Amino acid sequence: MSGAFCLSQLLQIPSTKILLKTSKFSKGLYVKAGATKYPNLCFYRNVQTVTYAIVDGSYVPTTTQTHQPDKTKENESTKPESVGAFQKLPMVMPSVDILYSSLRKAKRVPPTKGIANIAKRERNRGAKQLDALMKELAVPLREYTENFPKKKYLHPYERSLIELTLGDGNYEESLTKREAGERLNEGLEKLEEVFKCEGKVVDDLLNIAKTLRAMPVVDLETPTLCLVGAPNVGKSSLVRVLSTGKPEVCNYPFTTRGILMGHIALNFQHFQVTDTPGLLKRCDEDRNNLEKLTLAVLSHLPTAILYVHDLTGECGTSPSDQFVIYKEIKQRFSNHLWLDVVSKCDILQEAPVIFIMEDSDTDNLELERYRKKGPEGAILVSVKDGKGLDELKVKVHEMLVTQMDRIRSSKIDEDNPELVT
């Protein structure tokens, strides 16, 4: 009779009728009736589920193996992130706070119990506290390196923002500094000194996180109007008129020192507006990071372009130079929807500017016409007296609706590549 069968019979017989005994001749259990009654005495503990196997008449617990997910495949399947990764950055503590918080926690670690010798007990305490300090310092640093997105997985627009705003290599350098961790074994005092010296890396990471979080969030599925032109031609003033954006408006070049975002709500439809730094007449190799930000927006985002011209001579860039910049940008981004605007027309009509320093090129009729009225089809506007603004708003709305149709069409083509011929 097997042990399992005896146990099943045992559970069906009242305890007041039987006396359990163990037979030395049988491998299992047997039941013997007795007249003596014994009180029921039960002890309960937490129930645990264990699997047993019968080996030579004894119950031997078996171990079960749980399937561990393959993290390698998960890492291999990492895909580039969409726009918005900067808003998911972890909160970075200042290096001083990390150090003193770790020191406080490490000093509370007691020595191992049972060590009678005072010297050994203190050595044990010091080793455990140093080990605890190393772990406490490693936790936030590991979190930062794991949760800050790798540059190669970012959207090209955000990669350009990092390179042109933070400088090439600064982002990766802040995430790979580990000198503090390499010197932990030199002792508590030396570790504190090293971490204070190298704590600037964490503070740099804190500033990087603040800068990246302040970057404008762009919805790739929402039509975006991008204002482009030479510095100080009136782009920021038009952004204030057209959208909710409130960029700085001053009478000096490069007022806009980054990408500024506003929004338009027309007929229950929502659109985005970006104010970009001005472009100068020079080759790409000589452009500063502000100008490269403008080119990055036009290169990586599906934008409709509102190009702003200033023929009054107040912006600091002559009409001839603006004409050269305009032709270059329009040729480079000819696939974008385009609308031309001549700003400050009230000043242009009251006191036309004669540019004596410019060479008159009578053979270039297009340039001569541009100097007087701007490019063909341009809308003349004035933020000061409101001239042309109503017409501009209507044209902008029509262009953004067309941009929305383009975005929807491209999305359908991506979702159904077999339909593309």
Image (tube, rainbow, N blue to C red):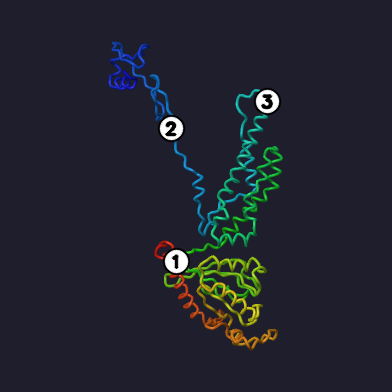
* Label 2: which secondary element: loop
Residue 27 coordinates in the image, percent (x, y): 36, 16
C-alpha separation, residue under disc 3 versus residue under disc 2: 45 Å
* Within-10-Å neighbours for mark 2: few <14, some 14–19, many 20+: few
Residue at left 28%, top 12%?
33
Residue 160 coordinates in the image, percent (x, y): 59, 62
Q: Earlier in the sequence, mark 1 or mark 2?
A: 2
Which three-letter amino acid code belongs to the residue tagged 2?
Answer: Thr
Residue 95 coordinates in the image, percent (x, y): 64, 48
Q: Quick one: 243 or 379, which is closer to the camera?
A: 379
C-alpha separation, residue under disc 1 versus residue under disc 2: 51 Å
* Label 3: which secondary element: helix
Q: Earlier in the sequence, mark 1 or mark 3?
A: 3
* Residue 342 in which image quadrant: bottom right
Residue 271 numbered mark, or none = none
* Within-10-Å neighbours for mark 3: few <14, some 14–19, many 20+: few
Q: Quick one: 138 or 299, which is closer to the camera?
A: 299
Q: Are marks 3 and 2 in contact (CB under 8 Å)?
A: no
Q: Is residue 89 visible?
A: yes
**Count of marks overlaid on the render:** 3
Q: Earlier in the sequence, mark 3 or mark 2?
A: 2
Q: Quadrant of the C terminus?
A: bottom left
Q: Which residue is mark 3?
A: 118
Residue at left 64%, top 69%?
284
Q: Which residue is mark 1?
A: 410
Which three-letter amino acid code belongs to the residue tagged 1?
Answer: Ser
Q: Which residue is mark 2?
A: 64
Q: Quadrant of the N terminus?
A: top left
Q: Is residue 56 above or below residue 360?
A: above
Which three-letter amino acid code belongs to the residue tagged 3?
Answer: Ile
